Amino acid sequence: MAANALLQWYRQNARELPWRSPPGAAVPGDADWPYRVWLSEIMLQQTVVATVRGYFERFTARWPSVAALAAAEDGDVMQAWAGLGYYARARNLLACARAVVRDHGGRFPADEAMLRTLPGIGDYTAAAITAFAYGRHAIVIDGNVERVITRLRAIDTPLPAARAAIRAVLADLVPADAAGDFAQGLMDLATRVCTPKNPRCGDCPLQPDCRAATTDDPSRWPVKAARRPRPTRHGTAWWIEAEGEVLTIVRPARGLLGGMRALPSSDWGDAAEAVPPVAGDWVHLGAVSHGFTHFELVLAVRGLRLAAKPALAGDWQNVDEMGEVGLPTLFQKAATLARAIFKTSEAA
C-alpha cells in the first residue's frame, strides 16, 4: 500500500529538524512542544526550511515558551522577525501567543476547530499542530502535499479548486495512527524526490501507484490557474543622515510592514513623486524593487546629508549599524543602496 511504502521511506530518509519528532517516535511530553511546532509552522509559511532554521533557534532561545513570547515587547518581536517577510504573521504571532496564555492557560488546544479560532491559524496550521504536536489524526495539506497527491492521482483540476479532490484522496490514505509521520513523509518526499521540476520518479516509493509517473511529463502536475499580472506601485524612501546617524521610523501597526522599523517613506501608489519630510538638497540615489503578494513596488531612494539633526519624529540610528536594527527586506535594500552611494561619494 502507498501509505506503508511512504512511511518506510520516511523512516530511512527523514530530515532532522529542531521542531520535528523522529519517525515513529511518540510526540514529546514537554509542555512547550506544541509551542515549538506552532512557531515553526508560522515561520515556514511562504519561507524555506534553510531560512527558518536560524530564526527558529534564535526565537526559542530568547522566548522558550508561549508565555515568554506573550510577554515580549512588540518591537522586539518585530525586529527579531525582520527578514522573514509577510509581517502580518509576526503580528498574528504575538496576538496568538497572548490569546493562548489569556484564554487557554498557556497551552495550545489539541482540537482543530478550537485551534482555528486563534489568530493566524488556518486549516493547514490547525491540522499540523494536531498531528505534529499531539499525535492525533488530521489531514495536513500544504503545497508539497498538493504536488505529490495531484501527481499520484493525475488530478487535472487546477489549484486551488483541486483541494477538495486532494482531501478526498488523503482521507483514504492517511493512517489513523501515523498521520504526522505520513504528512511529514509527503513533505520530505516532495522536497527530495517529487520536486517541482525534474522529479526523480525512479527513487520514489509511490511510483508503482503514481499515475503521473506513467506519463512523459509528471511535472505538469499540479495544474495551476493562470495568474493575473501584478500591478506596479511606486513610492519614495528618504535617507536622512546627520551627525553619523540615520532617521528611522516605526510604521503604523496596520497595513503592509505594520509595526516594522523603516526609513521614512511616501505612500505607495501610481506616482513616484512625493514631498520629502524636510527641505534640502536631496540627491536621487537610485531605486529598489520588491514583490508583495498583490503588487510589485518600485521605491525611489533619495538621500540628504545634514550638519545637524532636524526636528523630525522618529529614532536616529548609527549609520554603520543600519544592518542590525531589524529593517524589513524592502528597506534594507534601500539602506544598502543609500549607504553604498554615500560611501562612494565620501571616498571621492
Image (cartoon, grey):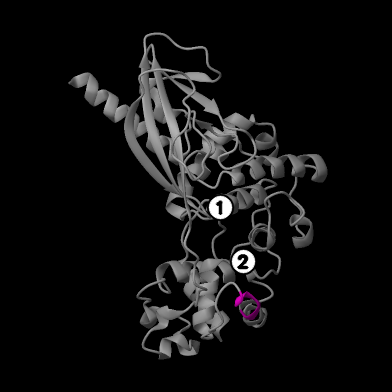
Counting residues from the start of the chain, the first of labels 1 and 2 encountered is 1
- Residue 162 lies within the magenta run: yes
Query: Circle 1: is it few (<14), some (14-19), or many (20+) Cα within 10 Å?
Result: many
Residue 287 against residue 207 in the figure, above or below: above
Residue 58 against residue 317 in the figure, above or below: below
Element type where label 1 sits in the image: loop
Q: Position of residue 43 (x, y in %)?
A: 55, 49
Q: Position of residue 203 (x, y in %)?
A: 38, 79
Observer-nearest of 23 and 98: 98
Query: Could you tell me which quadrant the C terminus lies in?
Result: top left
Observer-nearest of 55 and 155: 155
Q: Which residue is drawn at 60% across and 77% down?
A: 162
User: Left of 217 or right of it: where is 189?
Assistant: right
The residue that disc 1 covers is 19
Q: Where is residue 139 in the image (x, y as percent from the top left)?
A: 66, 71
Q: Residue at x 65, y 31 (%)?
A: 72
- Residue 125 lies within the magenta run: no
Q: Residue at x 59, y 63 (%)?
A: 25
Say if mark 1 contacts mark 2, CB within 8 Å.
no
The disc labelled 2 sits on which kind of residue?
Answer: Gly
Q: Position of residue 144 (x, y in %)?
A: 51, 68
**Quadrant in the rendering for residue 103:** top right
Magenta stretch prevailing secondary structure = helix
Please provide the residue range marked out in magenta. Answer: 161-165
Q: Residue 161 carries which label?
A: none
The disc labelled 1 sits on which kind of residue?
Answer: Trp
Element type where label 2 sits in the image: helix
**Is residue 204 in view?**
no
Q: Which mark is residue 180?
A: 2
Residue 237 against residue 20 in the figure, above or below: above
- From mark 1 to mark 2, how far is it between C-alphas? 13 Å
